Amino acid sequence: MNTAVLRSYKRQRATTRAIQYTILLVFMLLMIMPLIITLSTALKDETEIYMQERFYLIPKAWKISNFVEAMQTAPWGRYFFNSLFVTSVSVFGSLFLNSLAGYSFAVLRFPFKNLLFVFLLVGIMIPFQVIIIPQYLVLKSIPLFGGNNILGQGGTGWLDTYWALIIPQLSGSFGIFLCRQFYLSIPYELNEASRIDGCTPFQTFTKVYVPLSKPIYATLGILKSVAVWNDFFYPLIMTTSDKMRTVQLGMQVYRNFALFRWDLLMAATLLICLPLLVAFFTFQRLFIQTAAASGLKA
């Protein structure tokens, strides 16, 4: 009897698992299908795309030259450099500043710490679009930049420069909150031990907490990279010249140019997505580990 019950339980479990995997497979196909169609279109000949008789997912003739042609029909080199430079500096700067602020809120004791943290949480709740006009006016009024006098008048300040694209991205409420939650999971005894050894708070941060921060750095780095690289609205407001366009602004201009060349448009889209795909798959394990284990702890 026990053997029969055990076999029935195993069959039930196998059936349940098969159903779960089938559902997951269906959702995976639904999510990955747009990417597959994009890749298929990017590799097709222009005439094959507009064939009315039948749709072929696999191209009859693979046209790799679409990627080369797409990159030659617009100043993509400048767009990619701008995005790579802005994203790299913003990510590395925000990792240091956010983790330092998160360490301060999690470990150090100072007046009004809880009140300041409440203001930090309010910053997470306010939509970015609400503060874009005050931020624009502040960046436009930076003294002695962009033709401004010492009072910040008469010129454009930091507008249409790398300063405007990078400086506001160097820190953020969500990044500080995420780092604070991670550092709260680290035993406080490590901080006390470092103080006994004569370390200053900053030395404790650099010698004790930073080496333990690889998971949170990977998580925050991926989130920040995606946010900065994919940002369209902020560069649209803060830049005006073609030389300062990022890939997202460049893609909008290129979409108008290649409106009837879906092969080139899809090729450019895939090349824009490639750096983010490489970054995610490189740090995927650390990203999932942090998000599941400590990123959302209260």
Image (cartoon, rainbow, N blue to C red):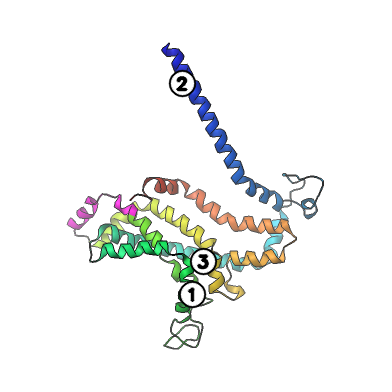
Mark 2 or 3, which is nearer the eye? 2
Label 3 or label 1, whichever comes before in sequence order:
3
**Secondary structure type for disc 1:** helix
Q: Does 62 sit left or right of 119 as displayed?
A: right
What is the span of residues highlighted in magenta in the rendered image? 181-198
Q: Which residue is mark 3?
A: 85
| Magenta run includes residue 187 | yes
Name the residue type under label 2.
Answer: Tyr
Q: Residue at x 24, y 52 (%)?
A: 188
Residue 31 image label: none
- The image shows residue 19, relative to residue 31, as above or below, that is above
Residue named by callout 1: 133
Residue type pointed to by label 3? Phe
Q: Are marks 2 and 3 in contact (CB under 8 Å)?
A: no
Q: Give me the C-alpha separation between circle 2 and circle 1.
A: 62 Å
The answer to whether mark 2 and mark 1 are in CB contact below 8 A is no
CA neighbours of label 1 inside 10 A, class few (<14), some (14 to 19), many (20+): few
Across and down, in percent, residue 260 comes to 75, 61
Side of 73 where 211 appears, left or right: left
Q: Mark 3, residues whose alpha carbon is within 10 Å: few (<14), some, or many (≥20)?
A: some
